[in-house]
Image (cartoon, rainbow, N blue to C red):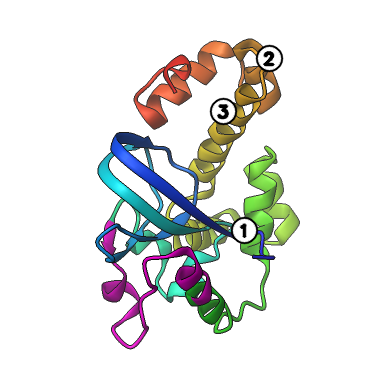
Amino acid sequence: MGDPGVHLWTRDASGPSLILPDGCLDVIVRPDGEAVVAGPDVTAREYDAQGRHVGVRFSHGLGPLVLGVPADELTGRVVPLVDVAGRAVPTPGPDPAALRDWVVRRLATVHDDDPWAPAAFAAAAVGTPVATIAARIGLSSRTLQRRCHARFGYGPQHLARVLRLQRALALHRRGKPWADVAADAGYVDQPHLARECLALTGRAPTLL
């Protein structure tokens, strides 16, 4: 959609699946037409569903601006969209075009004069240390902690852990062996990667 913080998706669900934490917030239209908000996940969660789901993923801290609700009020929760955005905000229809139109209308209402959140997300996504991120965007550690909770649902250290795991899985999907993945993604060694994967997903890397 021209915005790096917005990704439209569709998924045909046919049973249980594991949803991995990714530092993002989703608006999802279920097969029955109900629109829900899936807040940022601290760790992976199981989701059991059937049928086509249409959604939009907001990354880079954009979701709280679009919905007008701090991310940490939604962390680990799935709630009806009307309960988040208010009944004055029309909910999107159950097809990709309707959801796209809804996102475009909502984005037109977003005004953010301080680009710290997308800069912090992009830096964390490539493995920049948290202290370096804070220095680059000119925030104290305490201020960065508070702002990250409001825009990402948790603090900068946990955001960095989540995005490092996402980076590791992306490298493995490209064919890299786990030992190389661990080194390239910023882990101390392969056992460190395995421990972090178990802590964040409940599974060993080889099972994801």
> Along the polypeptide, which appears first: circle 3 or circle 2?
3
| Residue beneath the point at 75% across and 55% down | 136
What amino acid is found at the position of numbered circle 1 in the picture? Ser
What amino acid is found at the position of numbered circle 2 in the picture? Asp
Q: Nearer the viewer, residue 54 or 166?
A: 54
| Residue beneath the point at 53% across and 20% down | 193
What's the CA distance linking mark 1 and mark 3? 31 Å
Residue to which mark 1 is pinned: 140
Quadrant position of the C terminus in the picture: top left
Give the residue at the far right of this rendering: 136
Residue to which mark 2 is pinned: 180
Q: Which dot, 2 or 1, sits closer to the camera?
A: 2
Q: Is residue 36 left or right of residue 194?
A: left
Q: Nearer the viewer, residue 130 or 117?
A: 117
Viewer can see residue 186 = no
> Along the polypeptide, which appears first: circle 1 or circle 3?
1
Residue to which mark 3 is pinned: 169
> Which SS class for mark 3?
helix
Residue 138 appears at what percent x and percent y? 71, 62
| Residue beneath the point at 61% across and 62% down | 117
What amino acid is found at the position of numbered circle 3 in the picture? Leu
Q: Is residue 138 above or below residue 24?
A: below
Quadrant position of the N terminus in the picture: bottom right
44 in the magenta segment: no
Q: Which dot, 3 or 2, sits closer to the camera?
A: 3
What's the CA distance linking mark 3 and mark 2? 12 Å
